[in-house]
Structure formats: C-alpha cells, structure tokens
Image (spheres, rainbow, N blue to C red):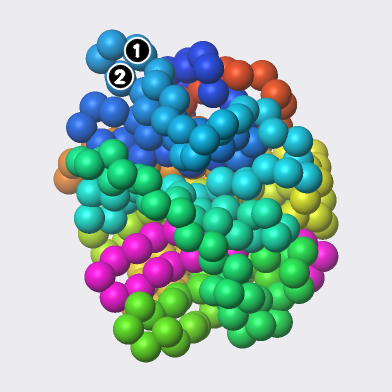
Amino acid sequence: MDKFQLSLLYTINGIGATSGLIFKDNYLYMISDNSSFLYEYQIAEKQLNKIELFENSQENIAKKDKLDFESITLFNNKLYLFGSGSTKKRDHRFIYNLESKEIKEKDLSKLYKKLKDFASISDDELNIEGAIIDNENYYFFQRGNGENSKNGLFIYNKATKRIQFTLMKLQKINDIEATFTDAILVENTVYFLAAAENTTSTYNDGEVLGSFIGSFNLKDLEIHFIQKISGTNKFEGLTLYNKSETEIEFLVCEDNDTEELVSGIYKLTLNMGS
C-alpha cells in the first residue's frame, strides 16, 4: 500500500505537544504529554474545552513531573487515558465517562511492573504509547526506543491476568528503527503509527527522522504493510475518521516537542485498493 494523501485539516490553539486523539460524534478528544487536562474540541463550533482530570490540572508541566499521557482509547463510551510508565509519576490511568462526565483515577504501577518483569524491560525503558481495549483484553503498544529496543505488543487478559509480549521489528531510517507511537483497531485490523527518532532514551527527545503508518491482524501479529508518511513530523495520535470500500481516512496529531500551545490535526487517507 503506497498510495496516501496527508493534509493539514485543523489548527487548534490552546493545546500543544498533542500525543493522542479520539474522533467521536463530530468532537475531537485529545491528550497532551505535558498536560493534565483532557481536551474536547467541538469541530462545528471550533471551540476547545479543557476538562480538569483533577484539581489544579496544569499545562506545560516540567518533564520530571508530568504524567506523560501518551495513550487514549475509547471503550464502552468511556475514554481511557494512560501514562507512559517511563517514570513513577507516569503510572496513572484516568477514565472519563462521556455520558456522566465522571472521572476515575487508578494507579497502574503494579500492572506496569508485571509488564516490565514479564518482558524483561527495565524501569526506564517501559514506554506505553498506544492502547486498545476490547471485551477480553488490554493491548499495550510498547515503544522500544530505549537502549535495548524492545518494541512490541503486550496483551493483558482481563479475566485470567495472563500477559503476552511479542517483539515487533519495524522499518529503519539511517539505521534507526521506527517504534510504535499509537494504534487503533478497525474491525479486525490494527492500524499503527510509528516514528524513527535518533535517541536511545524514553525520557529525552531526539532528531525526528520520519513517521510511518502500518497494519497487522491481531490473530497472527504479522505486519501487512508499513508506509512512510513524513520525513519531518513525529505523529503520535491516530483515530478513525471515515471508511469506505475504496479508502480509509484517519486523523493524526503531531507532538512537536515544544511548549507552544498550538496543534495541527492532519487527515491521512489510504487507498484500500493499492
């Protein structure tokens, strides 16, 4: 699959370092990795609302203190926000009920420790950048941009608490391997974003070499395709926008690694027949 179109669709003022998004009912729900707000953008009105996840939520939090929200997913009309797990302060999950507006917080440090122990990942190399939830499992996408390059997929069964971890090697740019930055499930297919970044740290950013989109099936975890979509942008959020028999449209967001409170939301179109 090598036919795609990428274009800037919205420029949203008031949110920066966007790391994940959900499109639902003409609303965009977004997270930022240096903020403790959930953002709601009303597309028709071009209005951005900030939802406090707890008292005194803040923007542009210092790197050492931030919750580092890198994953947002929708399940049973609830938004699940996950910290990356790369420091102790990043072990939290928040649930936002779209109907009742209720917010719940949970400490995931015990679960994250189990994931690290199972896959032999050090404390500073766990880096959850995408999440999917279905009736049976949680799927956590580990961005293997640490020194040991353990890029892969955790599958955590809700009933049995059983953990699986599968290493997944992706394409390289200048000998730097692309690693997961987000993923969603569309019918039976996982679509994922990945970025190649010249760093061996889950904490410090590096030179961005490019971003990719790809897909695989959850049954065999074999990658069907992977396509470079940018040589300069670090795309970190992916959501389904529209799907037909001939093409599929996504919205993607970019983490520009700055404190500027402005975000570009891009439309990415893939030709299903290519």
The one nearer the camera, 195 or 80, is: 80
Q: Residue at x 66, y 83 (%)?
A: 117
**Above or below, 81 relative to 44:** below
Q: Residue at x 70, y 60 (%)?
A: 88
The residue that disc 2 covers is: 43
Give the magenta part as a residue range.
130-149
Q: Mark 2 to mark 1: distance in Å? A: 5 Å
Q: Give the amino acid at mark 2.
A: Ile
Q: Residue at x 61, y 40 (%)?
A: 33
Marks 2/1 in contact by CB < 8 Å: the verdict is yes
- Label 1 packing within 10 angstroms: few (<14), some (14-19), many (20+): few
The one nearer the camera, 138 or 272, is: 138
Total count of labels: 2
The residue that disc 1 covers is: 46
Q: Give the amino acid at mark 1.
A: Lys
Q: Residue at x 36, y 14 (%)?
A: 47
Residue 198: % across, % down? 80, 48
